[in-house]
């Protein structure tokens, strides 16, 4: 019944890591987490996407099963992905299964019998399932027999309304603790913000659990945020020059936009598909499968896509519209580069994004004023990030309460985080030394201009117009006044006689937009969604009007013209890989990939579940002659060596 292909009766966690998964070392805090949970402790695990959360519960599950504790129940929100998760474990020789609504009564019954015979190491189930009488009965029977080893709650932030994926079904998971207080529980998430974390602990009753907080840095991801000028063309150029033929995700806000962009990419000869909640479930499933299984697909999607997608070789995540907050941005961009190879997080954003997001918060009727206030604060923090002239990584990590140390990048666990301040976009002139070397601001430091004077002009203009006319106006009209344009509307309201008419003729419209974005981002100006998106002064504006704060802006409009992309010369990931392999190894790699594709199709699994690219590359480089040569290659566990070793040798021999 042991799922571990080993002769040793009591394998240690490290044995399991190397024999089952084929990895030689734990990553970061994995070992500490695994040890704690193996010994029956409760745990809250906060680790970025790609950090290696799965092993944190899979290894304890195997060790505890071998020690006679029975099955680990994994609660995972997406039934669509359970098949592949279980497939990956089965490939590694671990007995795992899932229970979900796609199964027949007979299938579920057969599984239940297997469970009661203690034949399974891991069982995946959706949260709504846990609450059914049948499941409750099953859990109680297992518990009676001493066969309920551990509960692992994946994507645990779904329990909180402050998170970005709130799922009401998660609320019922508190019953696990109430009903089975002696069964250890662990909750895992890649969301790090303080509010969500507190809420999660309370809702899931994890007050006593030990917390494991990893560094949230993803050093292999390059962050770039550029001004939105012609988003469609910008995206096309980005993909063609930097990620030709590679897998990526493009996020847009609306379904319509998703369809348009997918169509545009296809017309340009890029393999692309659309994905959003408006498509029927079957089609969505098909497209998700294709994305996982085929090489080099681009998925254009709303945020409905991505949670739980553990495709390791997504080379870029592009945002054509701004997400709601930094948590969302970080989670979405985190889907790039899980395999640790270099990847891009690229976003275009503009004034319209700011206006749209504000409006969505202001006009949402379901939420309380307190809720809206929190959402506004979170949006402000993201706007500050977008406008920031300093290292993006330092800002991102700062938001999660972490400090980026220029010299020691992946320094241990972060300090206890405090509630993020939302970070004002206005800073006193001070130099911040953080430098990651892998974000747009570090690679191409933006020119900065002192826009304090311009900001003051803008603020007084808003004030004067409101005073003179008794009503507020929108951004376009205000910029026309500042720039001294005589439009019909200006004449109609007599605004050419205002003292602020024409005082900003020296700046281009793009610069005014940038000023305005900053003022909105730092809450000096509010866009009133209930009154035609007109602009209103907020109390904070006084700081600039009185000369107490200065405004520094990135020279975006100029930078785009002057600094032509040095990035085109950036060696692509593909180029790098090919450069390090000799001709023979390249030949072997090509054969191995073709072979892997066949196996994956036969098993109806994504190729990376059979072997990761990195494993195939290591094999190709090694030019193995015997099974011994394959031992110790990262990703080559005992079961895979048995199942595929001989085949791999044959494929390599054919390739010469
Ligand atoms: P998360 O769920 O935290 O996003 P995963 O559990 O999917 O991350 O792990 C990300 C990738 O890292 C997976 O492909 C996994 O096989 C790999 N991985 C995890 N732990 C290790 C390790 N100790 N050594 C090598 N690779 C690892
Ligand atoms: Zn940086």
Image (spheres, grey):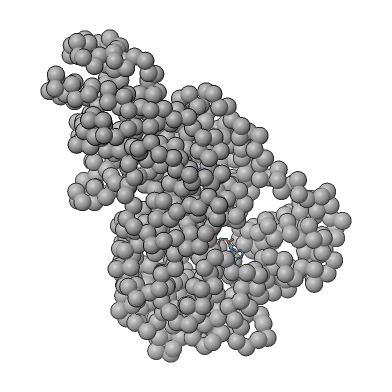
Q: Residue at x 40, y 39 (%)?
A: 430
The answer to which of 250 and 31 lies nearer the viewer is 31
Number of marks drawn:
0
Residue 142 seen from this side: yes
The answer to which of 84 and 539 lies nearer the viewer is 539
Side (left or right) of 308 relative to 325 = right
Name above or below for residue 180 compared with residue 547. Answer: below
Name above or below for residue 566 compared with residue 163. Answer: above
The location of residue 389, given as percent across then percent down, is: 44, 37
Q: Residue at x 55, y 32 (%)?
A: 236
Quadrant of the rendering where the C terminus is positioned? bottom right
Quadrant of the rendering where the N terminus is positioned? bottom right
For ligand 1, which image quadrant applies?
bottom right
Q: Residue at x 32, y 28 (%)?
A: 452
Residue 284 seen from this side: no
Q: Residue at x 44, y 68 (%)?
A: 212
The location of residue 113, given as percent across then percent down, is: 48, 83
The answer to which of 180 and 456 lies nearer the viewer is 456
Q: Which residue occupies the extreme bottom position in the image?
A: 145
Side (left or right) of 645 relative to 386 = right
């Amino acid at each position: 019944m042991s799922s571990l292909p080993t002769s040793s009766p009591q394998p240690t966690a490290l044995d399991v890591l190397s024999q089952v998964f084929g990895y030689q070392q734990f990553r970061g805090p994995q070992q500490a987490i695994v040890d704690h949970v193996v010994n029956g402790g409760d745990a809250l695990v906060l680790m970025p996407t790609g950090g290696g959360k799965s092993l944190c519960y899979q290894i304890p599950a195997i060790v505890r099963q071998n020690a006679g504790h029975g099955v680990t129940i994994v609660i995972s929100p997406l039934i669509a992905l359970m098949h592949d998760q279980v497939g990956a474990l089965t490939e590694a020789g671990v007995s795992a299964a899932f229970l979900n609504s796609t199964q027949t009564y007979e299938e579920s019954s057969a599984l239940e019998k297997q469970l009661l015979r203690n034949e399974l190491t891991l069982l995946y189930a959706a949260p709504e399932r846990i609450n059914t009488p049948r499941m409750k009965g099953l859990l109680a029977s297992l518990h009676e027999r001493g066969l309920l080893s551990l509960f692992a709650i994946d994507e645990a932030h779904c329990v909180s309304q402050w998170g970005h994926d709130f799922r009401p079904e998660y609320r019922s998971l508190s019953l696990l603790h109430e009903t089975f207080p002696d069964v250890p529980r662990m909750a895992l998430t890649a969301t790090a913000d303080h509010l969500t974390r507190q809420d999660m602990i309370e809702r899931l009753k994890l007050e006593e659990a030990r917390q494991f907080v990893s560094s949230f840095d993803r050093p292999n991801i390059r962050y770039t945020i550029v001004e939105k000028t012609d988003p469609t063309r910008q995206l096309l150029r980005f993909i063609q020059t930097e990620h030709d033929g590679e897998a990526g995700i493009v996020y847009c806000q609306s379904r319509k936009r998703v369809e348009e962009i997918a169509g545009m990419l296809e017309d340009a000869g890029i393999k692309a598909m659309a994905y959003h909640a408006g498509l029927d479930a079957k089609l969505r499933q098909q497209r998700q499968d294709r994305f996982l299984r085929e090489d080099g697909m681009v998925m254009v999607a709303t945020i409905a896509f991505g949670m739980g997608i553990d495709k390791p070789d997504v080379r870029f995540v592009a945002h054509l519209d701004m997400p709601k907050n930094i948590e969302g941005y970080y989670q979405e961009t985190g889907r790039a580069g899980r395999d640790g190879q270099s990847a891009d997080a690229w976003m275009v954003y503009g004034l319209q994004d700011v206006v749209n997001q504000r409006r969505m918060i202001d006009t949402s009727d379901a939420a309380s004023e307190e809720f809206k206030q929190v959402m506004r604060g979170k949006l402000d923090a993201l706007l500050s990030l977008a406008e920031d002239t300093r290292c993006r990584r330092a800002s991102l990590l700062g938001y999660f309460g972490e400090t980026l140390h220029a010299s020691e990048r992946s320094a241990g666990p972060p300090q206890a985080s405090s509630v993020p301040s939302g970070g004002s976009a206005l800073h006193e002139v001070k130099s911040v030394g953080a430098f990651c070397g892998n974000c747009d601001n570090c690679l191409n430091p933006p020119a900065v201009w002192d826009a304090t004077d311009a900001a003051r002009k803008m603020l007084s203009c808003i004030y004067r117009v409101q005073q003179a006319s008794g009503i507020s106006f929108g951004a376009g009209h205000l910029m026309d006044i500042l720039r001294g344009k005589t439009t019909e509307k200006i004449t109609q309201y007599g605004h050419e006689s205002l003292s602020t008419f024409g005082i900003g003729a020296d700046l281009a419209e793009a610069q005014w937009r940038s000023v305005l974005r900053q003022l909105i981002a730092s809450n000096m100006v509010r866009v009133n969604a209930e009154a035609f998106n007109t602009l209103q002064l907020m109390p904070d504006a006084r700081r600039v009007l009185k000369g107490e704060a200065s405004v520094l802006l990135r020279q975006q409009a100029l930078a785009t013209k002057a600094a032509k992309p040095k990035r085109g010369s950036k060696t692509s990931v593909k180029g790098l890989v090919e450069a390090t392999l000799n001709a023979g190894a390249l030949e072997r790699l090509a054969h191995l990939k073709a072979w892997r594709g066949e196996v994956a199709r036969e098993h109806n699994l994504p190729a990376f579940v059979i072997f990761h690219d990195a494993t195939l590359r290591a094999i190709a480089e090694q030019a193995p002659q015997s099974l011994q040569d394959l031992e110790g290659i990262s990703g080559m566990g005992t079961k895979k060596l048995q199942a595929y070793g001989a085949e791999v040798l044959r494929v390599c021999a054919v390739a010469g």
